[in-house]
Image (tube, rainbow, N blue to C red):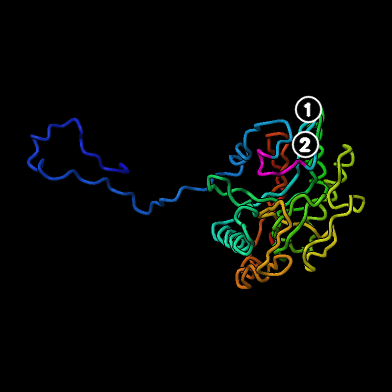
Amino acid sequence: MALVDYSDSDSDDSNHPDSSLPPAKKRRVSGSDPKLPPLPPAFRDLYSSAVRTSTQDDPSLHGGRKRVTPHVAGNWPAHVYLEWNPEEEDYKLLRLAVRDVQHALENGLENVHSLLQNDLGVQLPLHVSLSRPLSLKTEQKNTFLNRLRAVTAETAVREFDLSPANLIWHPNEDATRWFLVLKLERTEGRELPRLLQACNRLAKDFGQPLLYEEDEPTRSKPLEAEQNVKDSEAFHVSIAWSLQPPTSQRLEKTVGLQQAVPADLRKRIGKTRIDFADVKVRVGQDVSSIALPKRRTP
C-alpha cells in the first residue's frame, strides 16, 4: 500500500469529469511524528568543533580568552572528558539560570557568555573535565588513546548518573576566567574520582599536568563561601564564563547566585539527572568515545 496517494500527472485532465475540482491534498500517514529523531552521538563527534582559524594565541578570535596551555607547533591539544547533552526541559532551565545571572550584572550580556549555544543559537554539548588541557606529540596520539581505553576499563566504572549539588562561580587555574558552573554531587560509587585518578596516572606517564592535584599551583580563593571546596570535590559542568570577576553594584560586592537565580529554579536544576555512558577524548579535531559497561540490572 502506498504511503501517499498522488494524482497521475501524465493523465489528461480534460478526460475526467471532476477536473474542475481542486487537486486532492496529500494524505498524511497516520501516527507519523513531525519531530526528527535526535542525531546519534557519533555524528556529533564528527562535527564537534569549529575549524581552526589560527595556530597563534589570538584572544580576538575567542572573545578575549587566552590559552592556559600555549600552543606548540607540531603538538596536538588533547582533553579527556565526559559529555552531557541536556534534554530539552533541562536545557531550558539552564538558559533561564544564565539569563538571570546576566540580568543581575551591569553589562551582563556582554560580560557573561553562555556556553549553552553557539553564535547561531545551536545547542552545544556540555562536559565534565577528566584532564587538564594536554599537549601530545604526533607519535604519542595512538599510544595515549590505547592506554586511555585500558585505564578506563581498569576502573570498572559502569554507566552512571548524578545531579547538580549547587550553582556557583569557579575560577580557572590562574584566575583569568570565571565560570558559572553546576557543582556535581558525590556518588556512592565514586565514579568521577575513580576515572579522574586513572586519567591523572596516564597524564603523569606522558609528562602532562594533572587535574585537581595538591601539587598544582594554588587556586585563587572563590567568590562565595559555598565554593570553599577541596579540589578533589571540584567536579563541575560549566554553563557560562566571564573574563572579569562577576560583580554588581545593585547586589553585593560579588553576585550572590542565591539572589540572582530564584530558589525554585535552583531547586528544579538540582533535580536534573545527568547520564554518562562513555569517556571521550579530543586530540586535535578528532573525538573518540570509550563506552562504559552497561549498568548492572537489579
Dot 2, how many residues are within 10 Å of its Cα: few (below 14), some (14-19), or many (20+)?
some
- Image-quadrant location for residue 54: top right
Taking depth in this image into account, of 149 and 64 the one nearest to the observer is: 64
**Image position, residue 65 (x, y; %):** 71, 44
Q: Find numbered disc 2 in the image and state the secondary structure of the residue it sits on.
A: helix
Looking at this view, is 105 or 71 the one in front? 105
Looking at the rendered structure, the number of numbered marks drawn on it comes to 2
Q: Position of residue 238 (x, y in %)?
A: 69, 54
Determine contact: label 1, label 2, CB under 8 Å.
no
Vertical comparison of 173 with 99: above or below = above
Q: Which residues lie in the magenta part?
A: 60-67
Q: Quadrant of the C terminus?
A: bottom right
Q: Position of residue 68 (x, y in %)?
A: 79, 43
What secondary structure characterizes most of the magenta part? loop
Q: Residue 20 appears at what percent x and percent y?
A: 9, 42
Q: Which residue is mark 1?
A: 73
Q: Residue at x 60, y 37 (%)?
A: 47
The residue at which mark 2 appears reads as: 145
Label disc, if present, on residue 130 of the rendered structure: none
> Quick one: which residue is furthest to the right in this view?
215
Mark 1 and mark 2 lie on one chain; the one further toward the N terminus is: 1
Q: Work out whether 298 lies above or below 9.
A: below
From this viewpoint, is residue 76 visible? yes
Whole-angstrom CA distance, mark 1 to mark 2, is 21 Å
Q: Is residue 259 left or right of residue 214?
A: left
Type of amino acid at the residue the image marks with label 2: Leu
Label 1: element kind = loop
- Is residue 156 at least partly visible in the picture? no
198, 154: nearer the viewer:
198
53 and 6: which is toward the camera: 53
Residue at horizontal 84%, vertical 52%?
Answer: 212
> Identity of the amino acid at label 1?
Ala
